[in-house]
Image (cartoon, grey):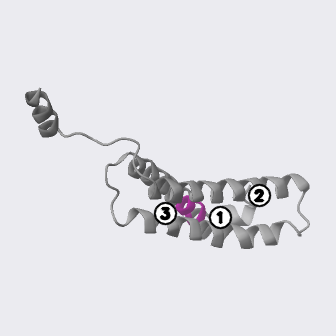
Amino acid sequence: MLTGLERADLSSWLRIGGSIGFGLTMLMLAMLMWLAESPSGWSQPAAWAFLVFNLAVWIPSVLRVVPGDASAAFKGVHVVLAFCSVGLAALTVWATSRPPIYKRTTSTQMASNTSAR
């Protein structure tokens, strides 16, 4: 949905590519931290940074697009994208702040459990 001028603008592509890459990275981080036995100390601050980043990008964007003269479809898509982006960021914060799904057992722990029987 980039206009002709935006297609030629490197900063537009960097912003879009950076946002998508950052979003995918944070989503993968959230999934890994949710599965990990002990999340690293930087995972939750990184997830919060992702949420703040999304809010800083989408709130001004929605406030600029919705009252503008764009079509209703464009406004609707913009609002849905904003909602999904912020929602995924919030999900990332939630996933990095909750306990892991399961506790991993190392091969040494498994061997000691087997020999104790």
Which class describes the residues within 10 Å of circle 1: few (<14), some (14-19), or many (20+)? few
- Figure check: 3 above or below 102: below
Q: CA distance from mark 1 to mark 3?
A: 32 Å
Residue 108: x and y, percent? Answer: 12, 39
Is residue 58 something that shows in the picture? yes
Q: Residue at x 16, y 34 (%)?
A: 110
Q: Along the horizontal axis of the image, is 116 left or right of 46?
A: left
Residue 47 numbered tag: 3
Q: Which mark is residue 103?
A: none
**In which quarter of the view is residue 3 placed?**
bottom right
Q: Which residue is mark 1?
A: 8
Relative to 63, residue 87 above or below: above
- Viewed as shown, does residue 41 lie left or right of 4? left
Amino acid of disc 1 = Ala
15 falls in the magenta region: yes
Instruction: Categorize mark 3 by other alpha carbons within 10 Å: few (<14), some (14-19), many (20+).
Output: many
Q: Amino acid at mark 3?
A: Ala
Of residues 105 and 75, which is closer to you in this image?
105
**Tag 3's secondary structure?**
helix
Q: Marks 1 and 3: which is nearer the front? A: 3
- Decide which of tag 1 and tag 3 comes sooner along the chain: 1
For marks 3 and 2 on the same chain, the one whose residue lies earlier in the sequence? 3
Q: Quadrant of residue 83?
A: bottom right
Q: Identify residue for label 2.
A: 78
30 vs 12, left or right, is left
> At x 51% / y 69%, what residue is drawn?
49
Task: Please name the predominant secondary structure of the magenta segment in the image.
Answer: helix
Kindly tell me whether residue 10 is visible in this rendering. Answer: no
Residues rendered magenta in the picture = 14-19
